[in-house]
Amino acid sequence: MSTLTVGSGGTYATIQAAVNAASAGDTILVGAGTFAGATITKELTIIGQGSGAGGTTITTGASQNGFQLSGNVDATASDTSATVTIQGFKFTGNAVGVNVASTAVLNHLVIQNSDFAGNKTFGVGMGSGASGLGTIEITGSTFEQNGNGTRNGDGDIVLFGFTGNALLKNVTVSGGTNAVPTNANADTGIQISGFNPTTYDVTHPIGTVIFDNVNVSGSYAKVLVEIQGYTNLDGLEFLDTGTTISGHAGWGWALQIDPTAGQTSSAQAGVAGQPGFFDDSAASALAPDTVDLSHVTVSNDIPVNVPSGSSLYAFNGMALGTVFSGTTVADHVTGAAGTNLIAGSNGNDIITGGTGDDVLEGGGGNDTIDGGAGSNTVVFSGNRADYLVSLNGSTYTVSDQNSGADGIDTVSNVATFEFADGAFSASDVVCFMPGTRIAVPDGTVPIEALKIGDHVATVDGRLMPVRWIGRQTVSRRFADPLRVLPVRIRAGALGQNVPARDLLISPDHAILVDDILVQAAGLVNGMSIIRESNVPMTYVYYHVELDDHSLILAENVPAETFVDNVDRLGFDNWDEHEALYPSGKSIPEMPLPRVKSRRQLPKTIRARLHQIGLVHPSHIKVFAA
């Protein structure tokens, strides 16, 4: 192998002349100064004098590329596995600094210690795809304002139609200096796309793609970093050295990760144009799709502004950090630091938010959603009444009772539940508490879904219209826990299938036990009936008012309706009652004995419930731990 020299005192005046004369495996040393680039078709190492003052600059012209990789480069290597190394250059004033042609066949491209600034379309790119590139490494290099908005998809590093491996290490990318992006800015800082550039078909998983100490900043017309068009993203790795993505994104979010790239399995494969075909079978074979963004910090100060009909229309006016769109199979996603919008699709997804205020949606399937730190929102596609919501400790279970498509989701660390018909504070979603099922003529409904005029079934067989639903917001911040914390009556604690599920009610709410109205606090035995302390700081109790003081079935437990021994002024919506009944509405108490405390509870009832508690699964589990 030989070393050829270019420039003052060298053997060759131009880099192209040296490339033409070199044999595969040779090294070309380029002296200081400004040179036109070259087309590289063989295995070579080309080294400049650095990208700073006194270094080597490659300027070929705005309509030509700096270094162009083309042809079957691998065929020139003795082992048919070629490496081309480019080191120590500044690329400026070219169409593309380093371009890989769509016809190139090259095992390994290494770009080291170089600078790319002011190239018209890409710093490093492969405009019409480079399926024949096996691995690209870009290390110790900087990129500034490559791409001027004249070509769709332009940017600093654009790996398009790319299904190989990539390493970006110690790389800094800087976009425009304008605070508000325009179309004169490049579209992206880094784009890695795996769909076919002609058919848009998505049929391959991502290779091993590693971000190791990468920083992207400045203004971009679309997003700062975009990764899209792969059946699986398991190979995408952000190392703990950190990746920072912070700037001004014209679309309203800085990092976009979209495995399907908007393509669909219903499209015909191999047909030019969009929509392309997304290979569900290939995705299923590699499921789950795992993406960990916990070592990524993302920020953006440009708000979303999309037309109605867009899936992100609801976020107009909100500046997002990361937008992740799931595959058709199970996605396991951990969010970045910053504001994440993570939307699963089908499959049993596991979604964990980052440290910011995130918006999370599981989509179809049985999903596990953990908001992480911050004030987070979980989104469901149906109306509130379509879901049964229950709280166990600090974890919510949300079951789709309508179509069933949303499955049964487990949700924690969220502040807001957003349904199609409105947003609810988490403390409002589960509190004779939301999610409590009340017997109605054709089954059961969550108590919060009842409306004035609806009919409920009473224990004595009547169908009675609801006259009012009282709502009372409770804060436990300064309150006496014994007065405000709900009582949890575990499923089966009162008898077989009574309650049918855990029942959460206020401590003063009475239920019927052996023809005695017993207020819930009087039933607490510390085993199967407990005071629930793991509740939000604020929550809501509901009370049903009928024409008389009756017993309705709540989770199959006979529970009292509203009676005048409670002042309606304590309810949030007392004025609604006054408007409905300006002359007042008297409801006398039914003629049954009432127990208000445990010491008043008859010994026979106390002993029976104690025996049930001793053998109740919740008690056995506690004492076996």
Image (cartoon, helix red, strand yellow):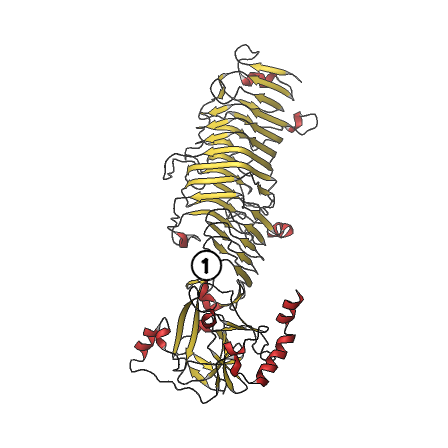
Front in this rendered view, residue 227 or 475: 475
The picture places residue 38, in percent across and down from the top left corner, at: 54, 22
Q: Nearer the viewer, residue 579 or 77?
A: 579
Q: On the image, numbered disc 1 is attached to which residue?
A: 415
Coordinates of residue 18 in the picture (x, y in percent): 58, 16
Quarter assignment of residue 476: bottom left
Amino acid on which disc 1 is placed = Ala
Query: Which of the 4 image quarters holds residue 587?
Result: bottom left
Classed neighbour count for the residue bearing mark 1: other residues with Cα under 10 Å, few (<14), some (14–19), many (≥20): some
Which residue sits furthest right? 79
102 versus 294 height, above or below: above
Q: Quadrant of the C terminus?
A: bottom right
The location of residue 339, given as percent across then percent down, is: 45, 49
Q: Residue at x 57, y 11 (%)?
A: 11
310 relative to 504 in the view: left or right: left
Q: Is residue 218 left or right of residue 532?
A: left
